[in-house]
Amino acid sequence: MSKLADKIRRTSRLEPQQLGFVTARATKNATLVLVGRASDARNAAELAQKGADVVVIGNPADGKLDVKSIGCESVGGWITGGVTAKQLKERGFDFVVFDPDETPSTAVLVDDIGYVMHLPAGVDDTTLRTIESFQLDAISVGTVESALTVRKQIELRRIFGLTRKPLAAAVAADISVEELQALRDTNVAVITCEGASNVERLRATIDALPPRSRRKDDERPTPLVPRSAPGAGEDDDDEEEEEHDH
């Protein structure tokens, strides 16, 4: 498991219900993974200092790039310009981001590295179901407007429902807590942005989010309808007929 996948798993957990009288929580876990998109190692290090949980470098082909110098537990890189997942793994990258329309299949053959697929626009249901069989840490759905509409929520739920993969979305730095919470409720687990000031601002917004909680629909009991054993109804009918005959 990549460190990115582990971070997504931990932030997606539901908060346990508190028992007894609890005055305050000792710690508060973040409920979204914040990814800073960087152009080089120096920019990536700055984003990590401003609060990014993960950084992604857009040009990882630079052989002088030292991943360890960034100071971030999970560093990803875009597969571009002939770069392969194997090469990035050997240089210390935790995961790679790729476009399925542009990436050769031979570039993503390594198993012990994380993968994030950038989802092309207009993908049909059959293709989404096929994606479920791929070993992916997340699916990037591109930029999502802050004013999230119900229609967009339905579309995001469709993608998640057919792929069963966590979603990653780019958002504006001025998104509100309420808008970010609505996005989180559509199975978006990763938020991405560019720029140190934007990372710092989103860090504060994510930290202000309320804990994840189970929706009321998930707690609704399922009615159990008793069913007669096979042949039971026939025996009852036979007994009634015998009574009428007498």
Image (cartoon, grey):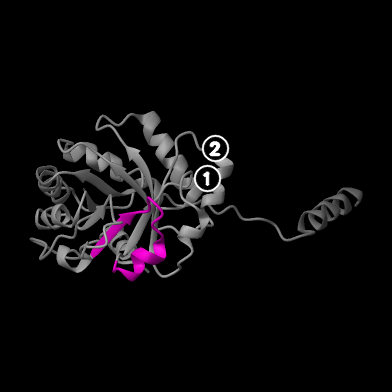
**Figure check: 168 above or below 229:** above
Measuring from the top left, give residue 8's x and y in whole percent.
31, 59
Residue with the mark numbered 1: 128
Counting from the top left corner in percent of width and height, residue 49 is at 9, 57
Q: Amino acid at mark 2?
A: Asp
Residue 82: percent from left, percent from top: 41, 54
Which sits in the foreground, 16 or 104?
104
| Residue 197 in sight from this viewpoint | yes
Asked if residue 213 is among those painted magenta in the image, a careful observer would answer no
**Magenta-colored stretch includes residue 81:** yes
Label 2 neighbour load within 10 Å: few <14, some 14-19, many 20+: few
Residue, x 28% and y 32% (percent of image)? 145
In the displayed structure, would residue 198 be above or below residue 93? above
Bounds of the magenta segment: 74-92
Q: Does residue 30 lie above or below 151 as drawn?
A: below
Number of numbered discs: 2
**C-alpha distance separating marks 1 and 2:** 6 Å
Q: Quadrant of residue 232?
A: bottom right
Q: Are marks 1 and 2 in contact (CB under 8 Å)?
A: yes
Are there few (<14), some (14-19), or many (20+) residues within 10 Å of tag 1? some
Image quarter where the N terminus lies is bottom left
Closest to the observer, 135 or 147: 135
Residue at the (52%, 51%) spot, across then down: 131
Give x and y (percent) for residue 85. 40, 62
Residue drawn at (16%, 63%), measured in percent from left and top?
A: 70
Q: Which residue is mark 2?
A: 124
